[in-house]
Image: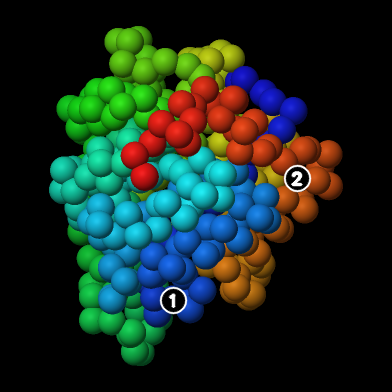
Amino acid sequence: MRTSPNTVISCALTGSVHTPTMSDALPITPAEIAGQGRDAVAAGASILHVHARDPETGAPTPDPAVYAQFLPALKATGAVVNITTGGSTRMPVDDRLAAARKFRPELASLNLGSMNFVFSGPAGKYAEWKFPWEKEHLAGSADVIFANTFTQIERTLTELAQAGTRFEFECYDVGHLYTLAHFLDRGLVDGPLLIQGVFGVLGGIGADHENLSHFVTIADKLFGDAYVLSAFAAGRRQMDFVTHSALVGGHVRVGLEDNLYLSRGRMAQDNAEQVAKVARILTELGREIASPAQSRELLNLKGADAVDF
C-alpha cells in the first residue's frame, strides 16, 4: 500500500439507495447537493462523490442536465469532484456513463463486478411514503443484478481515460481485487490505483474487521505500493471502518449515501456532520487531514482546470 502523511476524506453526498422518506437530511435538489457539498468541504472533505436526483421526486437520475446544475458549485469549493459511473442498479450502462462522458471529471467511480446489491430491508418500515416510487425501489432491489461485466468495465476504462479521468475502483469483495489486477496486467489501468473497499452491502463482503484485514493483505500481494487504500462500511459500522482504514494507513469515506446516522439512534443532520466527526477521529489518531491539493497530488489527478464543468 502507498501511504501518505495526510488522510483523504471522501464524502458521498446522496447516492441512489436511500430515499427521501428515510431522511429529511438527504440532499435531493441541485441546490441542496451544492450546499451540502460546500459544507462538507468546509468540514474537511477533499473529494466529493456525486450522484444526481430528480429534483421533483428525489429519484436517482442519470441526466447530465441535472448534474450541470450543481457541478460548477462543487468545483468552486476546490474539492475533487468524483462522478459516479455506477448510477443506480437499474440504469443501463449508457445512462450510467452519460455524466462522466460529458463532464470529463478528474475522478470517476468504477464498480469492478456484477453482484447482488440488496437494500430491500427498509421497504417494510414505513406506513407512508413521500413519493410513490420509493417502496418498489427498495423492495425490488432483491430481484435485480447490478451488472458490471468485463466488457462494460473495459469500455468505461477506455472511454473515460481518453479524457484524462482517473478512477476510484469500488471493490465489494476480494474477488474484485483480482479483476482489477487483470485489467492492470492488460495495461488498461495504471498506478497509483485508488482502491475503495466497500463493506456491508448485502450481496458483497460483510462489514467484519477480519474482512478488511484480509482485503489489505490481498491488495498488498497483488499491487504492492502501486495502490492507495480507502475503505468504508455501509450502515452502522461506518465509523468503525473509518477508524480501521486510517489505522492501517488508508483513507476514508463517509456521507449520507452510505449511512443516514451520525451515531446509534441519532440521524445525521447533513453530510458535513459526518465529515466533521471523522475529521475529529482522525485528528485524535494523530492523522492530518489532506487538502484538495494534497489529494490531487497523491492520486495523480489532472486538475480542476481540465474538467468540462
Mark with earlier residue (2, 1)? 1
Regarding residue 252, the answer to whether it shows in the image is no
- Judging depth in this view, the residue of 270 and 69 nearest the camera is 69
> x and y percent of residue 65 in the render?
25, 57
Q: How far apart are the alpha carbons under marks 2 and 1?
A: 29 Å
Question: Residue tagged by mark 1?
Answer: 22
Q: Quadrant of residue 82?
A: top left
Left or right, 144 with reference to 165: left
| Helix, strand or loop under label 2 | helix
Tag 1: amino acid: Met
Q: Position of residue 49 (x, y in %)?
A: 46, 48
Image coloring type = rainbow
Q: Residue at x 83, y 39 (%)?
A: 286
Residue drawn at x 28%, y 23% as measured from the top left: 162
Give the image quarter of residue 174: top left
From this viewpoint, is residue 281 visible? yes
Q: What mark, if any, has residue 282 been given in the picture?
A: 2
Q: Dividing the image into 4 quarters, which one contains the N terminus? A: top right
Kind of residue at badge 2? Leu
Q: Residue at x 32, y 54 (%)?
A: 68
Q: Quadrant of the C terminus?
A: top left
Residue at x 48%, y 52% (from the top left corner): 74
Total labels drawn: 2
